[in-house]
Amino acid sequence: KFVVNTQNVLSYYFPYNFLDFASIVKELEKSVMSEFDFTNEANYLREVRYNMMKSPFSQLVKVPQPLRILCTKNMLVMELLDGKQLSRSINDQLVDALDGDRALARELLRPKKRAQEENKEDDSGMYAMYRNFQKILSLNRNYKNKTSETSQQSSVGNRGILNEMKTIFSLILISKQSRKKLDLLIDVHGYQIFHDGVFNADPHPGNILDLTDGRIGLLDYGQAKRLQPCECIALAKVLMALRDGNEDSVADAMRELGFRSKLDRSDILAQTAAFYFDSDEVFEKLGYNNNKAFMEHLQKVDPMIVVPDAAVMVARTSILFRGIGSLLRQRVKISDRWYPYAKAAIQEEVKLKLCT
């Protein structure tokens, strides 16, 4: 029933045979249904926690320990982590920097889509937050920094300018710290995918904590995904090819991973790979304002008929992190962050083959 209903919804909203619905929806169904078995989630928590404790990120992230003796199929009990949801933590920092102005903080974190509709320039990084802040100030705040007729008014105006500068520097610092945390999260998941083969396929901001000890807390492994070694290697080859930028190599790697399209066009396979596993730049460069219009274009030109299970949840992870990046005004290119882990996976495979 879940599969049928979801396929009907997708077919209604995407009349151009958006993708291989059955493969995608069945993979999502398996992932969602696993969330109703907390014993399964406890096992994943325990495994990922162990993997992270012996990883290069052991001092940077923390996965809570499940209390196995108290866990059942209907109840999950785990270690309490001291911190806030990452999204709430960033919002609180912005509110503090803006002297308690929550409305302005929300405006700064407005969706990237709205920003693109209003301004076609690059909206990524610290400069965008600075520029957007200045724009909003001119519309929403009455800073007394105009030429004054009296010394008293001039003094107030100078204080206004100093306060504005202080706020701007605070915003730049928040942006820089947020980018560092986002890069860490992307790196951690790249390591989990290509080194461990087990990762959380639902890393939305609500499942990420900003801990009081400075580390990042990783929660909710109800939608964890396990990859087979051959799937990790096939995905790694796609990431390597994306990083190198050769269209034919990307298309060949996608075919090896299991993607199949009606006309088997290399350019469409390469563009699909870039959207799934890399960045939003692929549809922006082609003049599309959103991924829905872009995917409809791809399906009109060369419909995708097979999407491998291994790709679905990895692509979801990639797209979720890019969504967080958009919220923070940070342009994210997944292949740059995951390249070292993909390369290491392929090198390890070569090493094992030489030893056998």
Image: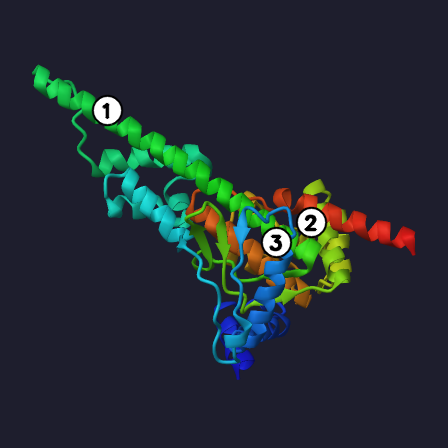
Q: Answer yes or no: is residue 325 visible.
A: yes
Q: Which numbered disc, 1 or 3, marks the residue closer to the eye?
A: 3
How far is disc 1 from disc 2 in space, using C-alphas?
Answer: 47 Å
Under mark 3, the amino acid is: Met
Residue most toward the front?
69
| Number of other residues with Cα within 10 Å of mark 3, as a class: few under 14, some 14 to 19, many 20 or more | some
> At x 36% / y 35%, what residue is drawn?
171
Q: Residues within 10 Å of mark 1 (few under 14, many from 20)?
A: some
Horizontal relation, residue 124 to residue 274: left or right: left
| 223 relative to 196, above or below | below
State the residue position of label 3: 53
Q: Which of the 4 quarters of the picture holds residue 329?
A: top left
Q: Amino acid at mark 1?
A: Ile
The image quadrant where one finds the C terminus is bottom right
- Spot occupied by residue 258 in the image (x, y as percentages of width and height): 74, 63
Asked if the residue under mark 2 is in contact with the one under mark 1, i.e. CB atoms within 8 Å, the reply is no
* Residue where numbered disc 1 is placed: 161
Residue at left 57%, top 49%?
Answer: 186
Badge 3 or badge 2: first in the primary sequence: 3
Indicate the colouring scheme: rainbow
Q: Position of residue 323 (x, y in %)?
A: 48, 52
Q: Residue 97 at what x, y percent from top left?
A: 29, 38
Q: Which mark is residue 239?
A: 2
Local secondary structure at mark 1: helix
